[in-house]
Image (cartoon, rainbow, N blue to C red):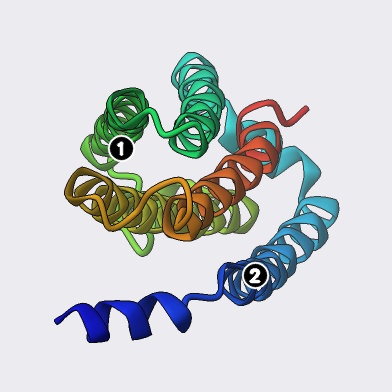
Amino acid sequence: MEKSAHIEHEHYDAEASKVGMWLFIFTELLLFGGLFIIYSVYRFMNPDAFHLAAEELDTFIGALNTVLLLISSMTIAMATTSLQKNNKLHTLLLSTVTVILGLVFLVNKYFEWGIKFSHGIWPGSPHMMETMSQGEILFFGLYFIMTGLHALHIIIGLVIIAVAMVRVNKGTVHANRAALLENAGLYWHLVDVIWIFLFPLFYLIT
């Protein structure tokens, strides 16, 4: 048993793990970068329609979610620092705060989407087809695709952080073996950065 644990420790490569995460983050940036380009092209072609459609969104909720993610990025960074200082309790507390903030973000997004659905606004809805211009339909199509994809990334990030928390609690992730939590933090920062672009594009468009 001790031998297998020793072998596992020998094969642990934090740098390789971080490089792998950075490569993954790069592919994610390419994905959203492509969507941002598509959005920019359609916005250039339909400026008035995009402005009119954006008025249907709740800027307060968008701003609140931005604040939540900014704070959560701070707490996950503090959790990583606490782990590096061998402060297990603070690591778990700060990670828990991060998870709670992420869940509140998702709840806000759920209600925001629910309001749109109650107004007959969703991709392919009869209401949109009958009352909205092509530009407005494009706006909401991109809105649901991009914010939905971002919400999926939030869920994935929360799962990764939860797994890291379990392993921190068990002691298999610690100051000398912190790559899992560090990578979870990197991924969470990616989620934050993506939202920083999504918020002004959809909610503050003029």
Closer-to-camera residue (88/43)? 88
In the rendered image, residue 180, in percent from the top left (x then y), is placed at: 43, 59
Secondary structure, mark 1, is helix
Q: Tell me if residue 163 comes above or below residue 10 in the rendering.
A: above
Which residue is located at x 56 percent, y 25 percent? 70
Is the Cβ of the residue at disc 1 closer than 8 Å to that at disc 2? Answer: no
Q: Quadrant of residue 116?
A: top left
Q: Quadrant of the C terminus?
A: top right
Name the residue located 51 percent from the left edge and 27 percent from the top edge. 78
Q: Label 1: which residue?
A: 106
For badge 1, the amino acid type reads: Leu
Q: Which residue is mark 2?
A: 15
Return the residue nearer the eye: 102 or 198.
102
**Lower position in the chain sequence, tag 1 or tag 2:** 2
Q: Amino acid at mark 2?
A: Glu
> In the rendering, at what x and y percent does residue 3 appear?
25, 85
Between tags 1 and 2, which lies in front?
2
Q: Residue 13 versus residue 199: which sits nearer the camera?
A: 13
